[in-house]
Image (cartoon, rainbow, N blue to C red):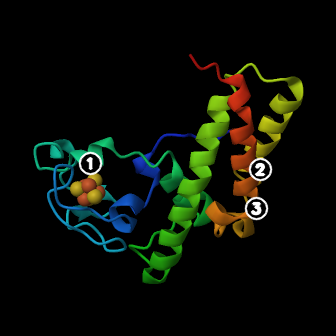
Amino acid sequence: MSRPALTADCSACAALCCLALALDKGEAFAIDKPAGLPCPNLDGRSCSIHSDLDARGFAGCVRYDCAGAGQRVTQEVFAGRSWQDEAGLTAPMIAAFADMRAVQQRLELLAAAEALPLASSDAAERARLEATLWPDALTAGVLEGFGSGALAQEIDSFIAGLRRYVVTR
Ligand code: SF4
């Protein structure tokens, strides 16, 4: 088991950001789209204007990165299945995507902390906490509602305690 990728792999995802997230018409997006409805530019699991996003007014899509949450939900949680083939998966995949984004945010913080000159006890705790979020260790029960759960709070508290390692000028 090892740390999952912390960048998006759209080829392994069921286009969850294009479904789950809201788009607000403006500088970043050419249209308004409510959360939970598929973007009209979606064609199967691919974006029909992928090569032309900036010019078509979707710079926000170019900038967005789910930090690997989309492929983890699609592959780890739903074994490659998709809301596009099974309508009943739409709501649970949207919910799991929100939870997994919160997981990946913590993983990003814990990965960054690895570069700090941590005392051995903190280094061990960092590694322990990180491993709780790796594939196979992250149970469905922990994933559901993760952002407001006990493990997220434990990680947030640990990260906050690392401020003493950060030199400020
Ligand atoms: S424009 Fe393309 S990348 Fe952006 S939300 Fe729509 S389908 Fe997804």
**Mark with earlier residue (1, 2):** 1
Q: CA distance from mark 3 to mark 2?
A: 12 Å
Q: Where ligand 1 lies, by quadrant?
A: bottom left
Q: Of all residues shown, which one is farthest toward the top?
A: 169
Left or right, 49 with reference to 73: left
Residue drawn 25% across the image and 63% down it: 43
Q: Secondary structure at mark 2?
A: loop
Q: Specify the farthest residue to the bottom.
A: 88
| Disc 3 residue type (three-letter) | Ala
The answer to whether the residue labelled 1 contacts the one labelled 3, judged by CB atoms less than 8 Å apart, is no
Alpha-carbon span between mark 1 and mark 3: 32 Å
CB atoms at circles 3 and 2 under 8 Å apart? no
What amino acid is at disc 2? Thr
Residue toward you, 138 or 165? 165
Q: Residue at x 14, y 57 (%)?
A: 30
Q: CA distance from mark 1 to mark 2?
A: 32 Å
Q: Residue at x 18, y 46 (%)?
A: 53
| Residue 131 screen position, x and y as percent | 77, 44
| Quadrant, the N terminus | top right
Residue for badge 2: 132
Residue furthest out toward the right? 121
Determine the secondary structure under disc 1: helix
Local crowd size for mark 2, using a 10 Å CA cut-off: few (<14), some (14–19), many (≥20): some
Residue drawn at point x = 43 percent, y = 73 percent = 83
Q: Nearer the viewer, mark 1 or mark 3?
A: 3
Which residue position holds label 3?
150
Which residue is situated farthest in the left direction here?
55
Q: Which mark is residue 152?
A: none
Q: Are marks 1 and 2 in contact (CB under 8 Å)?
A: no
Image quadrant where one finds the C terminus: top right
For disc 1, the marked residue is 60
